Image (spheres, rainbow, N blue to C red):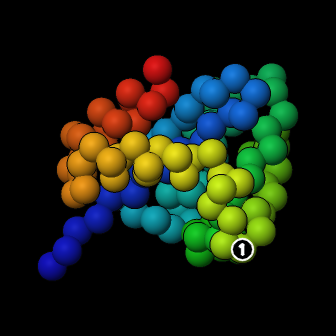
Amino acid sequence: MREYTYAFAAVSPHDGVLDSLVLPNGDAETMSFFLTEVARRYPSEFILMLLDGAGWHTAHDVVVPENMRLAALPPYSPELNPTEHIWDLSSASNPSPTWSSTRWTLSKASS
């Protein structure tokens, strides 16, 4: 049986700050958890989070914090999503990243 981990990430296009969590599932519950954590880190800021078409991004039971709004990117437009470049780094340095190498890559990308 194949096991997955899911890297949730948000990058500020203004200053390049990366917020990320590695979670065991990709579903509405973990998406809500990630959104809540990002909102908690920036309580005095309004956050416009752009999302790609992952199913859990658009699930009806995703809980969106008060200081955040979600907007969908156009389909098939990874070039508009700054977090996609994290995977470029991961793929280039390690074609089959493990949890620790993915965590290292995400940390390195944010510094």
**Whole-percent x, y for residue 9 in the image:** 53, 45
- Residue placed furthest toward the bottom: 1
Viewer-closest of 96 and 18: 96
Per the image, the residue denoted by label 1 is 75
How many numbered marks does the figure carry? 1
Occupied quadrant, residue 106: top left
Q: Mark 1, residues whose alpha carbon is within 10 Å: few (<14), some, or many (≥20)? A: few
Residue 54 located left or right of residue 107 = right
Residue 25 located left or right of residue 37 = left
Residue located 44% across and 49% down the image: 88
Residue 102 shows up from this direction: yes
Residue located 72% across and 74% down the image: 75
Residue 89 located left or right of residue 64 = left
Residue located 59% across and 75% down the image: 55
**Whole-percent x, y for residue 104 in the image:** 30, 33
**Whole-percent x, y for residue 63 in the image:** 69, 57
Viewer-closest of 7 and 106: 106
**Whole-percent x, y for residue 48 in the image:** 81, 44
Residue located 38% across and 27% down the image: 108
Viewer-closest of 13 and 72: 13
Residue 13 located left or right of residue 8 = right
Residue kind at label 1, given as amino acid type? Pro
**20 over 78 or under it: above or below:** above
Viewer-closest of 89 and 103: 89
Secondary structure under tag 1 reads: loop
Which quadrant, please, contains the N terminus?
A: bottom left
- Residue placed furthest toward the left: 1
Residue 33 shows up from this direction: no
